[in-house]
Amino acid sequence: MGKTILTVDDSLSIRQAVTLTLAAAGYSVLEANAGCAALDLCRANSIHAILTDLNMPEMDGVELIGRLRALPNHTFTPIIMLTTESNPEHKARGKAAGATGWIVKPFKPDQLLAVVKRVCPP
């Protein structure tokens, strides 16, 4: 398999859609349903890029990004927010925390793949 992408979302259907899209393009995909599980996966695996929702239980996507950026192996890992939120204030919070990009759900598979390929070529 190619590079490993982590998708973090409390919605199983979103995680499945992301996994199907990325796996078809040759990426290996890990899934987490919440921030704490995502942090555990990032500590235990080599992750090349991360897609995270904003609104999740335990910790939101902005807090997750901040905690990921504090890990030595993820200071520069591309992190894309994949969320229903399009408010400029939310985007500013995400960018300040270290988000690399922002995609609004529902997403088009081609759009998602283009962004992932730009930040993490297969």
Image (cartoon, grey):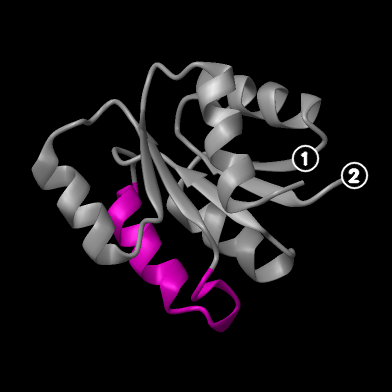
Toward which corner of the image does residue 95 lie, by quadrant?
bottom left
Among the two numbered marks 1 and 2 on one chain, the one whose residue lies closer to the N terminus = 2
The count of marks equals 2
Residue 32 visible in this rendered orientation of the protein? no
Amino acid at dot 2: Met
Start-end of magenta stretch: 58-76
Residue furthest out toward the left:
89
Task: Where is residue 122? Give x, y as percent.
Answer: 77, 46
Q: Which residue is mark 1?
A: 27
Categorize mark 2 by other alpha carbons within 10 Å: few (<14), some (14-19), many (20+).
few
- Asked if the residue under mark 2 is in contact with the one under mark 1, i.e. CB atoms within 8 Å, the reply is yes
Q: Percent position (x, y) of residue 63?
A: 30, 60
Which residue carries the number 2 mark?
Answer: 1
Q: In the visual, does 89 lie left or right of 17?
A: left
Q: x, y (%) of residue 80?
A: 44, 47
Foreground pick, 36 / 27 = 27
Q: Mark 1: which amino acid?
A: Tyr
Residue 34 image point, x, y percent: 46, 45
Residue depicted at 16% across the width and 53% down the height: 92
SS class of the residue under badge 2? loop
117 vs 107, nearest the viewer: 117
Helix, strand or loop for the magenta stretch, by majority: helix
Callout 1: few (<14), some (14-19), or many (20+) C-alpha neighbours within 10 Å?
A: many
Residue visible at 55% across and 51% down in the picture: 50
Q: Is residue 95 left or right of residue 12?
A: left
